[in-house]
Each structure stands twice: as C-alpha cells, then as structure tokens.
Amino acid sequence: MPLVISLAAVFLLVIIFVTYLAQHYQWPAKPYTANQSTNQELDFPDFNTSDLSPLRFRILTILKQEHDQPGAGTKYSEGVRELWCADFVSWVMREANVPLSNPNSGSWRIPGVATLQEYFESQGQFGSLASDYQPKPGDVVIYGAEGVHGQHTNFVVAVSGNEITTVGGNEGNQIRIQRFDSHDQKHAVIGFGVVEP
C-alpha cells in the first residue's frame, strides 16, 4: 500500500512540474516559421530618430545590431540552454539601461513569457490588445500559447495601422523579423509591454 501512495505522489509531482514548465518556460515549444504569412526574409526597417524617444531609439539600435550580428541563444540567457525569446527581450532591455526585475529571483533576466507579461502588468505597463493600445516601436509583444508562434515574445520595430513589424530571438533559433496584422487571431497577440508611457 505505501508503494502505491508513493507512486501517486510522484505522479502528482510530475504533473505539477510539467504544468509549471508550460506556464513559465514556453514548454513544449511549437515549431516556428519565419514570416508566417509569406515565408520570406525581411530587412530591418529604417527608423527615423526624430520619431522616437531616446529609450525607444536605444532599443531599436540594439535590435538592429543584434539582428545584423546575432549571438547564440546562450548569449542572451546567461549561458542557460533554454527557449530564449524572453531572455532576448530581457537582455535587450538591460543593454538599453532599463533592466527588468524578475519577480521570482530579482534578476534582470525573465526567462518565461508568462512571467514577462506579469512583470509588465505589475508595473502598470501592459497594453492589452482588447484595450486598443496602439503599440510603438520598442514595445514588447506578448503572444498566447494558442497562436502560430506558441507562447512567445518579441519587439515591435515598426507600426502601420494594425500591421506590426517585429524582431525577436528564438525564432527558428535565430533573431528574425516578421510582419503581420496584430489583430489576426492566428497570431494570438495578447498585448504589449509598454517600455515607456
């Protein structure tokens, strides 16, 4: 009888652990295809410095540098081998001199998309898609798990109406650019981390 109880306890712990991974570390990951609508590679868009605040300009400058000369995923995750889209967002924010603060560890690195969303919400800096917030270059996109990207995050680098151009890490295990209608449900955009009001 004690063996049955022990096996049940182990099984329950495994379920709790898998649920935790799914909620905080984008596990299991969905395969990613660059530019879902056309499958073509896009160039980094030009940006006008007079249209951007100094912070947004720094973020886009870092994104362009990393797009043009990307590092391995472990560069952005302090050497940890994991899905690294949220690590990339955290790393870029730190490089732009506005480090995030992981609510679980206090570290600048927030490795999970759900925790990244929670961070922006706790700071009063989350604009949900339902709120009709209009994203700006430099804002962080948060995607739901049900979309073509799976649970994912990246940066807005250009906006034209509802169409956004994004740059993100761990997109096909690379830093990639994509362009799409943010209101198209297949992308499952939940909202945007607003880097500044």
Image (cartoon, helix red, strand yellow):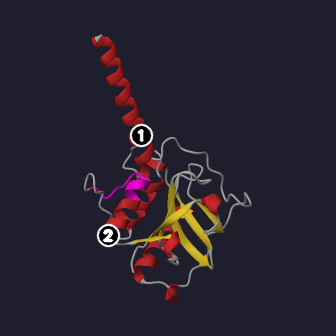
Q: How many numbered circles are shown? A: 2
Which of the marked residues, 2 or 1, is nearer the chain's N terminus?
A: 1
What's under tag 2, amino acid-wise?
Answer: Gln
In the picture provided, is 59 more to the left or to the right than 159? Answer: left
Residue at the image point whose x is 50% and y is 77% from the top: 133
Asked if the stretch drawn in magenta spans residue 189, the answer is: no
Question: Foreground residue, 57 or 152?
Answer: 152
- Which residue in the protein does label 1 denote? 19
- Locate residue 159, reporting x and y percent: 59, 77
- What's drawn in magenta, residue-wise? 107-116
Question: Foreground residue, 25 or 1?
Answer: 1
Residue at the image point whose x is 40% and y is 32% from the top: 15
Q: Is residue 95 above or below residue 17?
A: below
- Find numbered disc 1 in the image and state the secondary structure of the residue it sits on: helix
- Locate residue 145, reporting x and y percent: 53, 51
Residue at the extreme bottom of the image, as rendered: 50
- Find numbered disc 2 in the image and state the secondary structure of the residue it sits on: loop
Question: Foreground residue, 133 or 140?
Answer: 133
- Which residue in the protein does label 2 denote? 123
